[in-house]
Image: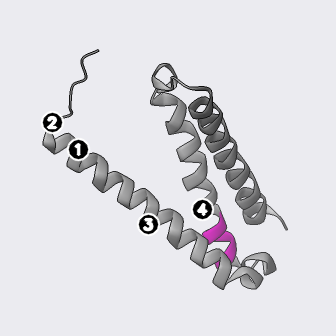
Amino acid sequence: MKTSRLPAVHRRFAVAQNFAIGATIAFCGLVCLCFAPELVAGSPTARVLCAGIALWWGGRLVILPWLRVWPELRGALLRVGFVLLCAECAIYALVFGWLAVRG
């Protein structure tokens, strides 16, 4: 079986994108840990922040299936992991969306 490598520019782009995604997730997690009472209290600023986080996770949920990686996930563990990743995105989008719109 022959494998081909991505061109170097594509690998660098993928690494940069993965770093940006990881940094965004880490930032949102730190905000949630450090400002949980404020986020739950429902101030306008907290609601806007929760809406932004919900949109980010919802966007990720839309993008993941669009990537069409399912045929490349050869093992059962990879497929279960992908389904769990999509479920995680959906749960976060729903919970943060609820925090953003609740009265």
- Mark 3 or 2 closer to N-term? 2
- Mark 1 or 4 closer to N-term? 1
Contact? badges 3 and 2 (CB < 8 Å): no
Q: In the image, which disc is placed on residue 11?
A: 1
Tell me: 68 left or right of 94: left
Tell me: 102 left or right of 69: right
Q: What's the residue at 69%, 71% (across, down)?
A: 47
- Mark 2 or 4 closer to N-term? 2
Contact? badges 1 and 3 (CB < 8 Å): no
Alpha carbon distance from label 1 to label 3: 18 Å
User: Which amino acid, by three-letter code, is at mark 4?
Assistant: Ile
| Residue 4 x/y as whole percent | 21, 25
Which of pointers 1 and 4 indicates the residue nearer the eye? 1
Residue placed furthest toward the right: 103
Q: In the image, which disc is placed on residue 23?
A: 3
Q: In the image, which disc is placed on residue 84?
A: none
| Residue 25 x/y as whole percent | 52, 63
Q: Locate the N terminus and report the quarter of the image it occupies.
A: top left
- Mark 1 or 3 closer to N-term? 1
**What is the secondary structure assignment of the residue under circle 1?**
helix
| Residue 69 x/y as whole percent | 47, 27
Q: Circle 4 is placed at which residue position? A: 53
Mark 3 surroundings: few (<14), some (14-19) or many (≥20) residues within 10 A: few
- Is residue 45 positioned above or below 56 on the image? below
Q: What's the residue at 73%, 84% (across, down)?
A: 38
